Image: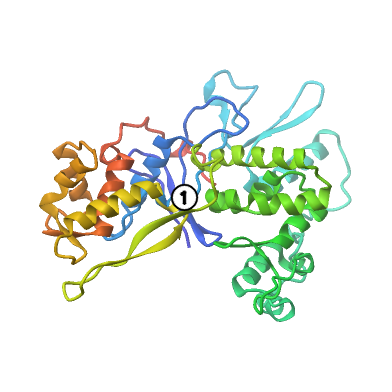
Amino acid sequence: MGLIDPNTSDGRVIFFLPWQGHTIAGTTDSPTQVTENPLPKEEEIQWILNEVRRYLSEDIKVRRGDVLAAWSGIRPLVRDPSANDTAGLVRSHMLYVSPGKMITIAGGKWTTYRNMAEETVDLAIQEFNLQPRNECVTTTTKLIGSHGYTENLYVKLVQNFGLDASVARHLARDYGDRAWTVCTMADPTGQRFPLFGNRLSPLHPYIDGEVRYAVRNEYACTVVDVLARRTRLAFVNAQAAKDAIPAITRIMAKELGWNQEQQDKEIQDAETFLQAMGLPSSLAHAGDTMTLASPAVMATSRQPAPVYEEVSMRYSQGLFHPDELGRYLAIFSEYDRQGTGKIERQELGMMLTSLGLNVPSVQLEAAESQLHVEQLNQLEFEQFLDILGYLKEGMYEATNPAKFKRIPIHRSGGGV
């Protein structure tokens, strides 16, 4: 179930929709220059985050690092040729018949493509006095993959191919009865279980067979085609999509006969493209994984000391470079004089100074208030990191966002 608020803090529309095991939140609407891959604007992301926080309980802290992907697009707004002013902007779609009887359809959105086609054909029938053989049939035409689909299809995939259950659910949901074909293109895992379906990312259920299916059956020609136009990995997690590039490139190179030069180009193009999906430019051509030290469990006063362990972590879900985490752990351990896994909150300012962070007291107080720790005497490491993350993101500025131009609800465009 989703949620929509047609009248946010500044009069815009925001929605939340469950999708691919995640939640999509959006959208914004602002002028832009026409580019092939428009980049999401940081101020727009921060506005969405601020609106999201209004709907969540206070104990849930939504951070910038929780945004796994962010993207933007250019809406195909058109002007009605028969209108005399800018009020003629069409925010759905428009049909126009020229003096020479050429029919043009413009605007619209993916969600209404079938209706747009029906209206265009109906207009052609009317303008040229055509005699249709029958009424429109696309309202009841089944989509590819739906003919043999059942709710229990994923169970049969698990039984017949030894797939992981989450992979089987994903394939059944996204491909319908074509999931059988996808599974026949999956390589053995070499494990006792699952038997087939090597994941492109350990974090998500996309597998190698989908890449081959995209090439052989869906005309995928580039790595970006697979990441963003056949699967939805780039939309779900930009960092995971980057991590999957080498595996996808190897499979496609074998399928399409790419030489090393072409493979290098595909990798470069895909990494550059992912910047338009929210991947920081500093990471677009960086290493795959970060390993950092993090407290496993902070000890209570009855335990001798906190235990630290190495944890593999994706940057898309974190705010700090491993070197930063090392410094923060060191300073926290230094001020954790009793070995309880806690520091005195009143010493927080001195700790920040030791880290070379000159944070004005008003900003530190804003961070403590926003994170609801201002009444605590002691802070755990996670709370210490929350404050550092708050300050690093500049969220103290985002809590007083600049005024946005108010957009009337009826002009928001609606839809997704």
- Residue appearing at x 72%, y 59% in the figure: 210
Front-most of residues 212 and 382: 382
Q: Is residue 90 left or right of residue 407?
A: right
Q: How many marks?
A: 1
Q: Quadrant of residue 392?
A: top left
Front-most of residues 73 and 79: 73
Residue 124: image x %, image y %? 81, 37
Q: Is residue 107 left or right of residue 294?
A: right
Q: Is residue 179 above or below residue 237?
A: below
Residue 13: image x %, image y %? 42, 44
Colour mapping used in the image = rainbow
- Residue appearing at x 19%, y 39% in the figure: 363
Front-most of residues 285 and 84: 285
**Secondary structure state at the residue bearing disc 1:** helix
Residue highlighted by disc 1 = 316
Q: Is residue 413 left or right of residue 123?
A: left
Decide if residue 35 is in sight here.
yes
Residue 219: image x %, image y %? 80, 48
Decide if residue 58 is in sight here.
no
Please identify the residue farthest to the bottom as the structure is shown: 159
Q: Is residue 177 above or below residue 90?
A: below
Residue 73: image x %, image y %? 57, 37
- Residue appearing at x 40%, y 51% in the figure: 318
Amino acid found under the numbered disc labelled 1:
Ser
Count neighbours of disc 1 (C-alpha within 10 A) and say few if under 14, some if 14 to 19, many if 20 or more.
many
- Residue appearing at x 29%, y 60% in the figure: 57
Q: Quadrant of residue 159?
A: bottom right
